Amino acid sequence: MTGRRIRGSTQDDVRRHNLGTILTEVHRHGYRSRARLTAEMGLNRSTIGDLVAELTEAGLVLERSASAQGRAGRPSLEVVPCPQGAYVLAVDLGVRHLAVARVGLGGDLLDRVDVESGRDWSDLDITVEAIAVTCARLRESAPAGARCLGVGISVPGVVRHEDGLLRFAPNLGWVDLPLGARLGERLDLPAVIANDADLGALAEHWRGVAVGYDNIVVMSGEIGIGGGIIVGGRPLRGRGGYAGEIGHLRVNPDGRACRCGSWGCLETEIGVDALLGAVGRPADSDMEAYRDVLSRVAAGEPDAMAAAARVARWLGVGVGILVNTLNPDIVVLGGPLGELFGATAGIVADMSAQCSLVAPREQVRLAASALGPDAQIIGAAELAFAPLLEDPIGTLTRHAA
């Protein structure tokens, strides 16, 4: 982090950058002392004071004494997010669920609504209306004066990065649908959309088990399986934003047909339906049925243990492929995969070790998500906050207009 002027930039550019840097640090960490900001940004104390004052006047941050947190010694000023200054709406749309949350600056989950599972989301109009109605409920519950700056949407599908078009969501039956644009028009808010695994990786990198790591793979999903990949601290998107579709690695030539049109894909071997099918339960059962199987594994029931072991071995195969290909610091297993890993960690680790080379295997850590079912919500919120963190005052000005 630096506040030094970049050659060729204008004074306004430098100020915008410095304001964004301070707000990002405060948003990401919850608080930052003036002294630390001064040291890390390479600016003098008066400049930091002016920048903090501008953010305070804009209603984005507050200053408090460090002694308010119970710290010993001479009190110093800390900069903290203003709890009701600005918020975004975060949407997690899954094949079998819909969750919408109001998330404040600083990452605080202020309010949340979970729509009943089992609904059919294949119709775009029905889906947009259900999301919009839920968003309206959350906006009505917000305190007077709190500013809603946008909505972030997590979807289990392939999203074109340049314009947010949802190109393909096989488990929802969607092809080339403008979900983000339609919802933004309906709410009269800026709306941004991204793949659920990509947002899960963003959330784990900023606020979860992968904090402090720069090379991260997150595997997650219910029915479909996606991969969020961060390399050198930056998301790996690929040419059109389609990188990370690890669920469609073809791992079993003798496997089942996949919704993508191929067969033997990894997601046919490790998803929720794979475990339920392995114990003879209907594929369209809900997450309660999945968790019931895992509880039977914990209780030592032989059939459940055998089914979980089979799925866990395929999960280990997938992890091993990713370890060899990407050489990550950490592989995070999110959603139902994280729950499976909690019950079968030894099997997953052993199989991934068999399927990966010694050198990258020695450098990787396997872990369940620290954020659980909130990972996509948190990632969607960070996506929606991005313009504010890039240009705080400009974003507020555009919002007011």
Image (spheres, helix red, strand yellow):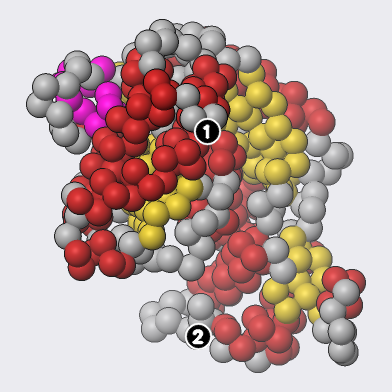
| Rendered location of residue 381, percent (x, y) | 58, 44
| Rendered location of residue 329, percent (x, y) | 35, 63
Residue at 87% x, 89% y is 73
Amino acid type, callout 1: Ala
Relative to 31, residue 368 above or below: above
- Judged from the image, the secondary structure of the residue bearing numbered disc 2 is loop
**Left or right placement of residue 325 versus residue 13 in this view:** left
Residue at 54% x, 82% y is 3
The numbered dot on residue 4 is 2
In depth, the one of 113 and 7 nearer the eye is 113
Write the start and end of the magenta stretch as one range: 259-272
**Left or right placement of residue 182 versus residue 364 in this view:** right
Relative to 149, residue 303 above or below: above
Amino acid type, callout 2: Arg
Question: Which residue has dot 1 on it?
Answer: 298
Question: Could you tell me if residue 92 is visible in this image?
Answer: yes
